[in-house]
Amino acid sequence: MLVNFVMAVFSSVDQSSTQTETGTTVGVKSKLAQIEFDKNSGRIEKLTLLNDKVKSYLNAIATTGNPFTFYFDVQPLEDTPIGGHSIDAREFQSRQFNFENEDQSVLKITSSIEKNGVELESTLKVEVVESGAFDLTLSLTNASASKQVVMADFPSLSGITLSDDLATDLSVYMRYAGASGTPAWQDRVNRYGGHWTFQFDIVYNQQNNRSLGYMILDKDWGSKSFHRKTTGAMKVLHLPSVELESGQMYTWPTARLMIVDGSWKVIAREYGNWVRSKFDIPTQPRWYQETNDFRSLHLPDWGGHIGSTKFETSTEFRLAYFDHFLRHGYLTGETMVQEVHGWRNWGPDKGIDPTGNRADLGGNEKMRTGIKKAQSVGRKVNSYFGASTGIYDVVETNKPREYFELMHKDGSYFKAYPFEEHHPRFGFRQATMCPGLNSWRQWIIHATTNLIEHGFDGFRLDEQPFDLDCFNPDHHHENPYNGPQRVAELMRTTRETMNRINPEIIIMSEWGTDYQVPYINSVMIHSHTGFAVTPARVAFPELYWLPHYPLGAFECALNGWMTQNDGACTLGEAINRAPDMPWPNRERFANLDNHGPITKWRRLRSQFPKALVHGQTSDIDPYCPEDNFWRGTLFRSKHYDLLVGGYPDGTMQLPKLQKIKLDRLSSDITTGYEIDAYTLEKKAVEIERKATNIFVAVKSGFSVVLLPKSSCPPKVEATVSKGIITLNLFAPWREDLIKKEFKAWIEIPGFELVGSPEISIPSVVEFKKTPATEEPGKYYFIIRGSQTLPYRGWFDIE
């Protein structure tokens, strides 16, 4: 058997790379790091930063891998190779070293071994890329006379040394949107596409600022599982096993190995950059950039629909419901995007057809009327769609439930819900559909296209990704483990169909995974992620993460997210959904009201989208040296930075003025303004700059601190009274400009504007009601333009 290890490039070559060689090692050096290999075996001997005088990130007592382990004649059992035998890099004997390319950015190591009657020859090719990382690609050619069955751990790293105490090492745990701050060295096995949602793994130590991670550059989203061990080892096992005939070659996806003297965020951003280099991520429509919020509405008579009488409502109310959709769906809250909850709750007449709306709610015509009324006052309407649980006999007739369902390896069927219990009227006709089943994909296309024809602005594919393994023989999957690829294909097909209708249609999913990123606009987040910005937000800020009911305003603020809840904290049941996530001082939440005090986070967030929605965050999160319960995030943008933080438990005022330490700040920022998230009151704050530290003093229990650069446009301030909007500017950092007028455009959806929409601020704007805005409730206006920060204001019509 001939084994070739080839390092391929997926980013620019590092022009500053050089070769290194000692009496016992050979390696390559990037602008940031150096990797060295043992001349005898070809295994990784050292992995060091050029400015790091401590020691290698991989120490001498490594036991396996570095960088690979092969398994022969094995089968995976719960993501673990069973039977057969293994061979890793330390068992090889090196034969030849040579450098390729004029810039010496490529090192090739050829090695061989004879074991268990199989002779192997390997070639390890290491390439340095512009980011300072090292790209590794593993190829295997069977030079034996007989067929070989092989699996690979690649990369496989052991002896990882970030500090002198493994217990102080932390990690990025990529479950759902991910969380930082989780213990690094626990026995973990997580299937990519199951409870592991991105193709990277990162460990780090905050005390000495060392981070190590790798990412799998697999644009086909192949199946794999991520492992960590208590001994300081981590690896990726690729699934399934590969059968190689004599002379046949197989290549595993490239792994990019990266070490950083700094934050784990650098590695997460590198992965996001790679995905962008391979896929065109959807451009968000302007209206979604301005709103990017989300609220879910359950239509009435849920209990009656499932066979209960507890929540029955009158026939008269149900028939009138869509006539009053605007009132019930929007005008009771400051929400721009409303989701009408889906067909299991309301949609099909008698629960049969997701493309038809219930006759007892007025049918399709009442739905269209309700949507148009909402849109006439500037709101957007999305639809729920159950994209995993379906009524199978409308997808294909004359097929049993078992034909459609995801099947485990043991032959049992995966059931997302106890159908008959949840939906006694029609649950016996439901199945947990396999996303790789073509008839189900086509049904989703048919049904969602119909929703758009009703007038919806978009839809959420609920329950996706349900991308588990599927061994159903009726589905003829070439690789039963490849759930991520099947879901990605479902999303791609849906996106392409919607683009042909209208590229501004919004597609939303549940949970969030990297293989959905090229095809969707936003994700509904269910579970708490800890009080730090999530890795998903760091890697893909252009994908909107829109939390559902469990997340409160404070946690959302730390991620720049909008929330359905105006309460500062919303723990409740959801704390049990993610038990592995970091929760500091959890006991402080024990006696809280579930929602905490009401905030005005929505109004604050709409004024700073360049930072909160589209901006990146500081590498090191801000913190309070004297109070470890304070949590915060520093968002960056071109014209200003924004510090968001406070106490997670809903405390409205800090016990004393607290100094918050910041990670770097432009010298162009000389002052700041703290805006209380509960009252919107603002006050100037001082910036204290010392030789190596920067501090900002805050007082509010939950606030935003605007840190403007000299180029920052003025902030708009507004009051509304009896059809009059009075607009003024706040910009004490630009006193030379405050006396000038700034051009902007105003829009008041559903109302008649008296005068031109082009205005100069300061200004007084008059507006009148129209038939579309006779309903009492909450309405809004929006200020656009490049000369001021954006502004969305809300007012009540009685």
Image: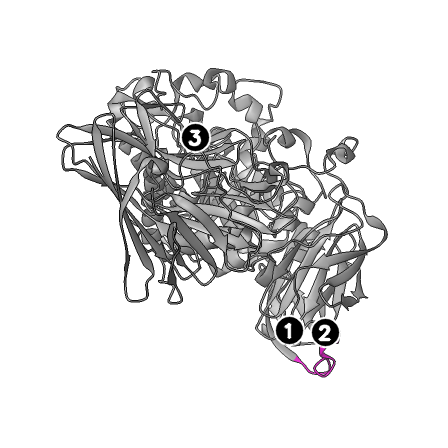
Residue 481 visible, this angle: no
x and y percent of residue 273 in the render?
A: 43, 56
* Extreme residue in the front direction: 23
Secondary structure under badge 1? Answer: loop
Q: Amino acid at mark 1?
A: Pro
Indicate whether 159 appears above or below 102.
above
Earlier-in-chain disc, 1 versus 3: 3
| Residue neighbourhood size for the residue with mark 2, other residues' Cα within 10 Å, grouped as few (<14), some (14–19), many (≥20) | some
**Is the Cβ of the residue at disc 3 closer than 8 Å to that at disc 2?**
no
The magenta segment = 729-741
Earlier-in-chain disc, 1 versus 2: 1
Observer-nearest residue: 624 or 348? 624
**Is the Cβ of the residue at disc 1 closer than 8 Å to that at disc 2?**
yes
Q: Which residue is mark 2?
A: 731
Disc number at residue 713?
1
Q: Which residue is mark 3?
A: 348
Secondary structure under badge 2? Answer: loop
| Camera-side mark, 3 or 2 | 2
